[in-house]
Amino acid sequence: MIEKVHFEIGETAMTIMTDGKYLKEAKDAVFDARAIIEAKINRDPFFGTTYDPYEASKNDEPLIKRMCHASVSAGVGPMAAVAGAVAAYALERIYGLGCRFAVFDNGGDIAMCADRDVLIGIYQDDPRFSELALLIRASGGMRGICSSSGRIGPSVSFGISGITTVFADDPILADACATAVANNVKDATRESLAEAAESINEMEGARGCLILCGGIMASCGEVPEIVPAKEGRATSVWLPSRA
């Protein structure tokens, strides 16, 4: 049976939606991912503070190396990918156990695998775009849907978008790229948003992006279908049968 749980630890605010038999392993993986990242920061505090691309060292854990690789690909600091990294690590743990439906939503940065269609609410602060959701079609693999905002949430953004969402097969890359694209949204004009959206083309591995800012919507690349969301300004994930 599909269950949905939410828990918070430190900066992690994780909602997990999956078969109940995988929940314990999923939660354990979240704690393991945090421990890996915290250990890296303890050894190398600069890793946790820099906003610049950061090269991995040969002794780093694979998760840290992936954060660094995403950092270089997107042109941001490695911690820009931290939420996606925790979600991805946990997803990959239970995917390896045979799970084929799971959504890890770490404060708007999502790692998922879905063998059925899923709706993901688009959370932002503009009533002109209220009650919208992304319709994510069923597929066999893992993917990332990660967001950054200059107006909502505690994460650092140097842009002004209401929400910038990036789609990629790798959630860690999606998270870093969402920060990078959002940083490029400097004013709420069609030209500025189009230029920011097109910057996704320079980030290898990213599939597409969606930007909402100042009543304007811009997109580039592969973007899921946007549909009305009957659950309102949801941060939630739900199945279309409930829509």
Image: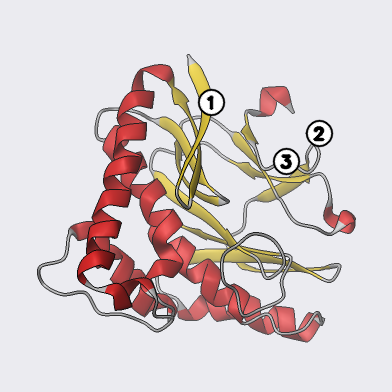
User: What residue do we see at 31% from left, 80% from top?
Assistant: 54
Q: Amino acid at mark 3?
A: Ala
Q: Which residue is mark 2?
A: 230
Name the image quarter holding residue 44. Answer: bottom left
Quadrant showing the C terminus: top right
Q: Which residue is mark 3?
A: 234
Q: Which residue is mark 1?
A: 4
Is residue 149 among what the camera can see? yes
Q: Position of residue 185 (x, y in %)?
A: 68, 80
Q: Position of residue 130 (x, y in %)?
A: 84, 49
Q: Position of residue 194 (x, y in %)?
A: 71, 80
Residue at the top extreme?
1
Q: CA distance from mark 1 to mark 2?
A: 19 Å
Secondary-structure class at tag 3? loop
Q: Nearer the viewer, mark 1 or mark 2?
A: 1
Name the image quarter holding residue 213. Answer: bottom right
Secondary-structure class at tag 1? strand
**Nearer-the-camera pick, 73 or 22:** 22
